[in-house]
Amino acid sequence: MQTKYVVVLGSLLSGIGKGIVTASIAKMLDAYGYNAMPLKFDGYLNYDCGTMNPFRHGEVFVLDDGSEVDMDFGTYERFIGKSLDKAFSLTGGKVFSEIIAKERKGDFLGTDVQIIPHVTDLVMEKIEKTSEERKLDVMIIEVGGTVGDIENSYFVEALRQLALKRKVVIVDVTYVPELQAVGEQKTKPTQIALRGLMQEGLRPDFIVCRATRRLDDKTRKKIALFSGLSPSAIIDDNDTNSIYSLPAILASQNLDKMLIDKLGLELKKTNDEKVAALKVDPSANISTKKVNIAVVGKYVNLHDSYASVKEALVHSAMAAGADLKINWIESELMEDSSFKNIDDILRGNSGILVPGGFGSRGTEGMIKAIRHARENKIPYLGLCLGMQLMTIEYARNVLGLDDANSAEFTDTKNPVIHIMEEQEKVTTKGATMRLGAWEAKIKPGTLAHSIYGKESISERHRHRYEVNNAYRDALVEKGMVISATTPDGNLVEIVEWKDSFGIGTQAHPEFKSRPESPAPLFLQFIKAAMEAQRMKALV
């Protein structure tokens, strides 16, 4: 069967949840037995997301193959439960790099290279090639940004051309504002945005309406009238407590069946269990067992910077039956010279997590939080930078190396964290770190072994710096446990404290966490925090 396409665009404004809608559509089609995968286009001229600041763009998500991609890929993988690869990430930088390379090789000799047809042809070629190679029944294409942006205009044109020869269903995600003073849902912005979409040669088959509350019938009918669609094709996507409820919300409005019908798909044997699950919100069961987790980081003012960390905590809390509250703590708050009592900030939290990051800003505050966790036996989980700072804190306060630090931050006499040997000669940025899924060997009898239940694991990585092997023996002699290394034993992968739940991993296990299979380290961290909170309540 020739691949069919669902295109998810945003009119009006960005950041309203196109990625979650895309992931939900992929999940619904998968439940009905179709091989459906998402592809994301981003118009920026970066080749990938590797050099982007998380403050501006949200977290950089890493795939098994080492690709650094948009954070929406985390949403895709968490919803469909499948791993994606670099072919599903298409950027303006990739497209134009390839066009220029072709031109330099002489592929366009005698021709003035233009956006149309050369760039648009290449876009269609890459879309169709990926679909054919993966034997997809349906590809769901998310267009980053907003219709009308210069950055994605050529991509939108390519999709218009694709629709001339392939079956393409258009889903427009819009926003329906409501002025509190008026108390009425306003459709005028959507009407204007629809005109812009139609001027691009695209007519929506479905309109998904983001709103703070459920769509009024009057609102639905008005949007249907101006778009020329049936009211049933105007889909309500009002605010909800959990993104994981969206497939159930969409399926309750029959979007799953309407999409299948609109695509003209051949009927397949459905997975009855998966289809039934579409009607269920996996986050609906609220537990009374509360657990408070402090995430101490340097990018906490934009929670999207730690999107996968947040979701991994949510997955684990759902699995453990916990009512989770995440307290986001800016690590720089604890670096001020006038700061005295760290307990004033961390009080009430039964677990402390320090996530990944780059650069020295805020690291001393994180180290203070780590020391507080170790000395007070508060469950601790360190990820990448959080594991490196865990090692620095131990070297300073247990080994007595007061100036212990990372060579990334400063020129220190005791660089307990230093750059990996193969990274020393790297001069370019982007796709040059230790990236993607790497195997680690776990030492039996350790906390890590009890958590994973096996001696060999694979987690995704994104880093240049590692524990300095020159300090390994000294750390172990003073009680730190090195519980996992690379298979050749050369690089430290996981470290632990002996006397309490304290574990740090050089990897990013949050990237592989799923609602139905939480990351093991996160799950046991949440359980340890719940037990700590229970014991505290008994005192």
Image (cartoon, rainbow, N blue to C red):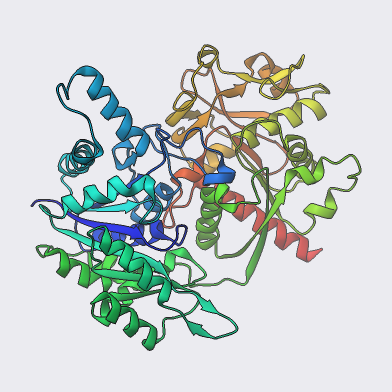
Residue 342 in the figure: left or right of residue 117: right
Residue 205 in the figure: left or right of residue 358: left
Quarter of the picture containing the C terminus is: bottom right
Where on the picture, by quarter, is residue 533? Answer: bottom right
In the depicted structure, whether residue 8 falls above or below residue 121:
below
Where on the picture, by quarter, is residue 409? Answer: top right
Residue 130's spot in the image, x, y percent?
A: 21, 40
Which residue occupies 27% across, 80% down? 232
Residue 176's spot in the image, x, y percent?
A: 44, 74
In the depicted structure, whether residue 497 falls above or below residue 81:
above
Task: Looking at this view, name the residue that lies furthest to the bottom.
Answer: 218
Where on the picture, by quarter, is residue 458? Answer: top left
| Near-viewer residue (489 or 52) | 52
| Near-viewer residue (15 or 155) | 155
- Tally the numbered discs: 0
Which residue occupies 49% across, 85% down? 184
Residue 147's spot in the image, x, y percent?
A: 35, 56
Residue 375's spot in the image, x, y percent?
A: 80, 41
